[in-house]
Image (cartoon, grey):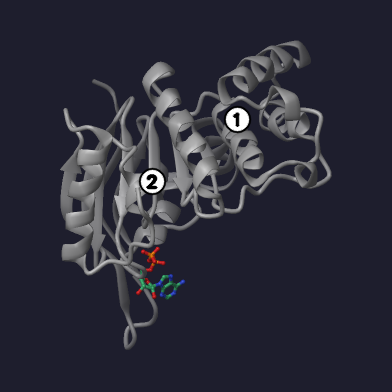
């Protein structure tokens, strides 16, 4: 199997010598191609820091992060921004679509930056719109769409470049439960049918139950790991809830 992400002995320390916060304290794990992995932990446990380091937005204090064979801790300037555009797809809690562009143009932008031809862009958008059920909103502006539709457009934008790794940060956080379920089902489909590799940060056990593996983080360290294996989604959800209870976590959702 192909390893897409390697995180090895990663530490991230914020602050000055006198006032240090160890946000990540020697974290190591691998993600294989085609995994759908969830990162859980209470507020302040280090989830955002980990995601920011993997997404090249922040830098590690020590350790190695390899994505699709490249050590991203060594990339700088244009090489780093090219890498981010070509290899990573992002889905954020607040969608982050450009208000002045239609759904179609928001999605197309990710490809035109990569200098893909107009014809190829159109073909790929039609295909991905079918997959994510957004055909009827392609000519609409973000303010004309529901939150669920906006997030599916954002997901289309994230996957259209065929990134090595899709990073989702609380992607259901701003959605009602019906739209959240729809998005989670579609992420599952992308993972199952397109072999997309997805890493999702969430504090929500219900969303996490759609993943195939969960890493629980506490005080910047890996506290526990759960694999779905042959469990049904609901069985997996119950297991996640019991680990979250051990973590003393916040959980504000019901299945
Ligand atoms: P989570 O996403 O799980 O809520 P974070 O990664 O945001 O956790 O934070 C982990 C720890 O690092 C917390 O103690 C937080 O206060 C600290 N931290 C995060 N970002 C910074 C920063 N820019 N400067 C100083 N401390 C930070």
Q: Where is residue 162 in the image (x, y as percent from the top left)?
A: 52, 23
Which residue is found at the position 38% from the left and 46% from the top? Answer: 207
Which residue is found at the position 18% from the left and 33% from the top? Answer: 231
Given residues 30 and 60, the one toward you in this image is 30
Residue 222 makes an appearance in the image:
no
The quadrant in which the N terminus is found is: top left
Packing grade of label 2 (10 A; few <14, some 14-19, many >=20) is many
Which residue is found at the position 78% from the left and 47% from the top? Answer: 143
> What whole-number distance in Å separates the C-alpha atoms at marks 2 and 1?
19 Å
Which residue is found at the position 42% from the left and 57% from the top? Answer: 59
Answer with mark 2 or mark 1, whichever residue precedes in sequence. Answer: 1
Q: Which image quadrant shows ligand 1?
A: bottom left
Packing grade of label 1 (10 A; few <14, some 14-19, many >=20) is many
Kind of element beneath mark 2: helix
Residue 207's label in the rendered image is 2
Q: Is residue 208 above or below residue 192?
A: below
Left or right of 213, for residue 141: right
Q: Position of residue 101 (x, y in %)?
A: 81, 39
Residue picked out by circle 1? 156
């Amino acid at each position: 199997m192909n390893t897409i992400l390697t995180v090895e002995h990663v530490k991230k320390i914020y602050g000055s010598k006198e006032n240090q916060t160890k946000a990540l304290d020697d974290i190591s794990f691998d993600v294989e191609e085609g995994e759908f992995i969830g990162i859980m932990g209470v507020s302040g446990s280090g989830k955002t820091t980990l995601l920011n380091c993997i997404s090249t937005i922040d830098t590690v204090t020590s350790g190695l992060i390899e994505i699709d064979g490249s050590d991203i801790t060594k990339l700088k300037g244009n090489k780093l921004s090219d890498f981010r555009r070509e290899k990573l797809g992002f889905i954020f809690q607040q969608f982050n679509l450009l208000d002045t562009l239609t759904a179609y143009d928001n999605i197309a932008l990710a490809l035109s930056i990569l200098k893909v031809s107009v014809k190829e862009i159109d073909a790929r958008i039609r295909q991905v719109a079918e997959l994510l059920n957004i055909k009827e909103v392609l000519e609409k502006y973000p303010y004309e769409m529901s939150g669920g539709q906006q997030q599916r457009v954002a997901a289309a934008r994230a996957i259209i470049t065929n990134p090595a790794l899709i990073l989702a940060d609380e992607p259901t956080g701003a959605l009602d439960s019906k739209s959240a379920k729809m998005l989670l089902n579609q992420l599952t489909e992308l993972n199952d049918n397109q072999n997309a590799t997805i890493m999702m940060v969430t504090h929500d056990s219900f969303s996490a139950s759609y993943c195939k593996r969960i890493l629980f983080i506490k005080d910047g360290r890996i506290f526990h790991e759960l694999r779905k294996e042959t469990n049904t989604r609901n069985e997996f959800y119950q297991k996640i809830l019991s680990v979250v209870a051990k973590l003393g976590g916040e959980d504000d959702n019901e299945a």
